[in-house]
Amino acid sequence: MRRVVVLLALLSVCDGVTFSQLCSGNPNNQRRTSDMWGQGNYGASRQDRLHQGLDIVCNDGATVYAPFDVKLKGQVIVYPNGLKMAINKGIKLEGEGLCFKLFYVEPDKLWGTLRRGERIGTMLPMQSVYPGITSHVHVQMCNKSDPTRYF
Ligand SMILES: *[C@@H]1O[C@H](CO)[C@@H](O)[C@H](O)[C@H]1NC(C)=O
């Protein structure tokens, strides 16, 4: 019986992918809660839809880091209609068996690999588009599932 418990504990540890620090100035991946523009949790309501990612606090111009060893998988366009150009960029990443996107980041490069803690790029000037918002990186899984359990 004890052996089974130990095995289960090991399995659940191996299963537990956790994002390390994503943004300079936010060592604990503090989440955007609520501000005049809305809420940062997955599933929060937006004007015409639900929020499909999790928002991690990140000041404009801050450095964005790889949360674990990742492969860079090319640029993301956040707003296909070409609006909000000041923040209309991001990067697609793979690592730890996960595929995810970071929105509102100017990536240093679009392809290749990075080790955990290395620079992905720079947080874009979100205040210029949403004055008074809690500036943040939006973390979205490629299949739009809830990323909260990885934080
Ligand atoms: C979405 O991706 C996550 C992470 O890879 C995986 O755990 C989950 O089962 C996937 N969900 C669906 C609906 O495909």
Image (spheres, rainbow, N blue to C red):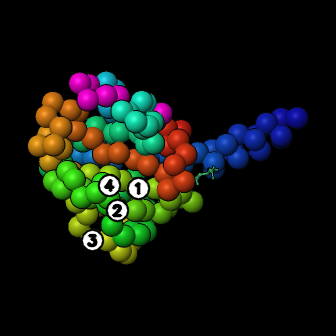
- For the residues labelled 1 and 2, the Cα–Cα distance comes to 7 Å
Residue in the image at 45% along x and 36% along y: 50
Task: Write down the quadrant of residue 1 in the picture.
Answer: top right
- For the residues labelled 4 and 2, the Cα–Cα distance comes to 6 Å
Magenta-colored stretch includes residue 134: no
Residue 76: mark: 2
Question: Which element is circle 2 on?
Answer: strand
Q: Do the residues bearing badges 3 and 4 touch, measured as CB atoms within 8 Å?
A: no
| Amino acid identity at mark 4 | Val
Residue in the image at 35% along x and 28% along y: 39
Residue in the image at 44% along x and 37% along y: 49
Between disc 1 and disc 2, the foreground one is 2
Question: Which element is circle 3 on?
Answer: loop
Marks 3 and 4, the one that precedes in the sequence = 4
Marks 3 and 2, the one that precedes in the sequence = 2
Q: Do the residues bearing badges 1 and 2 touch, measured as CB atoms within 8 Å?
A: yes
Q: Is residue 132 visible?
A: yes
Q: Do the residues bearing badges 1 and 3 touch, measured as CB atoms within 8 Å?
A: no
| Amino acid identity at mark 3 | Lys
Q: Across the whole image, how many numbered discs are drawn on residues? A: 4
Marks 1 and 3, the one that precedes in the sequence = 1
Packing grade of label 4 (10 A; few <14, some 14-19, many >=20) is: some
Residue 101: mark: 1
Q: What residue is disc 3 on?
A: 109
What segment carries the magenta color? 35-43
Q: Is residue 115 visible?
A: no
- For the residues labelled 3 and 4, the Cα–Cα distance comes to 17 Å
Q: Do the residues bearing badges 3 and 2 touch, measured as CB atoms within 8 Å?
A: no
